[in-house]
Amino acid sequence: MTSRRPLTGAFIALEGGDGAGKSTQLEMLAAALRRRGLVDTAGRPDLVLTREPGGTQVGQEIRQTLLHGGEVAPVAEALLYAADRAQHVAAVVLPALERGAVVLTDRYLDSSIAYQVEGRGLTEAQVRGMNAYATGGLLPHLTVLLDIDPKEAALRQAASGGPLDRMERAGLGFHQRVNARYRSLMAADPERYAVVNAAQPPEVVHSQVLASVMAILADLGLAELPGSARRGKHARPAGARVAVAAAAGHAAAAGVTGPAAQAGAGQPGQGLGSGGRRVAQ
Ligand code: TYD
């Protein structure tokens, strides 16, 4: 997949097991970024809040099949998630990144690695291969992992009282393997991740998530951290973007574990390479 234009935006994914509180945290993050006046170069708000599966109309139908239909064979399941992702990237994510938006997605590729590899027994090479084809190798600048013990997550889900979908019903063993896989993905490639303990109170989780995101936006030249000497190695010319004040301060100060909060992500649109985020897989 070749981009028609450079990818000048920022691509951020939130990941975690079921019951980690991703949806709530994504809403809180989006609200905080909006309050800080994140705007595009034309002065319009340009923050895209999206999700997988189901970030497009086609994706909605795939989501329905995956979560509320009958049993799906493991390979079919993996291909359906990849198909949802292909449509999501083509119709939502790439156009937004091309126009310089900040894209926040509730789940992306790592969900497939965690759930379909660890949970369904496919090999990592199989899942990475089908997703490289689906996405053209597009990776987020930053993936924030909301880390939670699956037992604690199950208690939360039980307390919320809602019906469980097909994935949520898969059992504690499944979710423990998924969680372990998330952790090992992070350990293997810490520059791509910030890991936040999701068992903390929501406001604490939020401030840590926000700090890690602000740090990466600063590295990309899309925001400035007040009082910070850091200059993003991919910073744009002054005035290209409105500065975003980061009340939460630096990620490291906020106790985010994992060095992704300080990592310089790669340069969007630079072609295949390490980071930024068309990456050959
Ligand atoms: P999610 O929308 O987070 O669930 P909910 O709306 O109930 O919080 O995700 C739906 C389910 O799909 C979740 O159990 C994880 C699973 N999933 C995969 O197995 N692979 C994937 O690639 C993705 C994106 C999600």
Image (cartoon, rainbow, N blue to C red):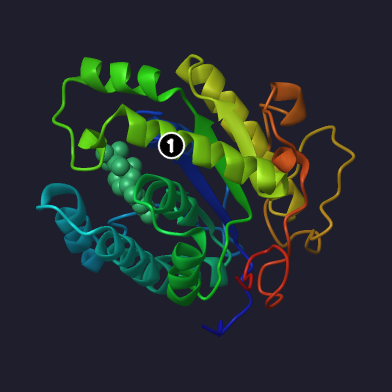
For the residue pair 7 and 153, the one nearer the viewer reads as 153
Q: Position of residue 186 (x, y in %)?
A: 62, 42
Q: In this orientation, which residue lies closer to the viewer: 82 or 271?
A: 82
Can see residue 244?
A: no
- Quadrant of the rendered structure where residue 28 is? top left
Q: Residue at x 9, y 52 (%)?
A: 70
**Residue 73: in sight, yes or no?**
yes
**Residue that label 1 marks:** 177
Q: Where's residue 6, x and y in %?
A: 64, 77
Position of 232 relative to 276 (above/below): above
- Image check: 151 left or right of 124? left
| Amino acid on which the number 1 mark rests in the picture | Arg
Q: Residue at x 76, y 38 (%)?
A: 225
Q: Is residue 90 above or below residue 44?
A: below
In the image, residue 222 lies at what x, y percent? 69, 53
Q: Residue 12, position in %: x, y?
A: 55, 51
